Image: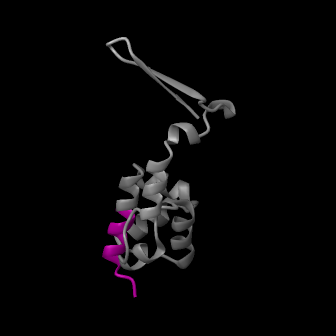
Amino acid sequence: MINSLEFTTRIKKVMDFHDLTASLFADKIGVQRSSISHILSGRNKPSLDFVLKITSEFNDVDIHWLLNGIGSFPKKNEIENRTATPTLFTDKLNNGKRIQRIVVFYSDGTFEEYQK
């Protein structure tokens, strides 16, 4: 059985990690804002559908951690993926454009060039 207080604490941790308000979190996982409010206040318990929406939208949330606190958040492989590839090169920018090259100029006149 899920401990509702601990579950809501873990949801808040996910929201804080992703810098989301309750409203934005609800929009992101595709539930009504009142659903989040009721779960965070302890009025309602989360449904399986609710839990699956969180783990589907946020790849760094492990279902075992979310439900029982077993494991870690964020998932270790998600942390490794984030540090292995800078998001600057992998995220799509406006109009589908992608960064191909970055040049950093230093005050001593030297520079470094980074290419995809």
Q: Quadrant of the C terminus?
A: top right
Q: Is residue 16 above or below residue 101?
A: below
Q: Residue at x 49, y 54 (%)?
A: 81
Compared across the picture, whether 107 is left or right of 55 comes to left
The image position of residue 20, as x and y in percent, is 42, 50
Say which quarter of the image contains residue 45. Answer: bottom left
- Which residue sits at x=49%, y=42%? 86
Residue 4 is a magenta residue: yes
- For the point 51% across and 42% down, the residue is 87
The x and y percentages for residue 46 are 47, 75
Residue 73 shows in this picture:
yes
**Residue furthest to the front:** 110
The residue nearer to you, when weighing 76 against 3, is 76
Q: Residue furthest bottom?
A: 1
Point out the residue furthest to the right here. Answer: 95
Secondary structure mostly seen in magenta is helix
Instruction: Count up the numbered dots.
Output: 0
The type of colouring in the image is one colour
- The residue located at (50%, 58%) in the rendering is 26
In the foreground, 64 or 101: 101
Range covered by the magenta-colored residues: 1-12
Can residue 44 be seen in the rendering of this structure? no
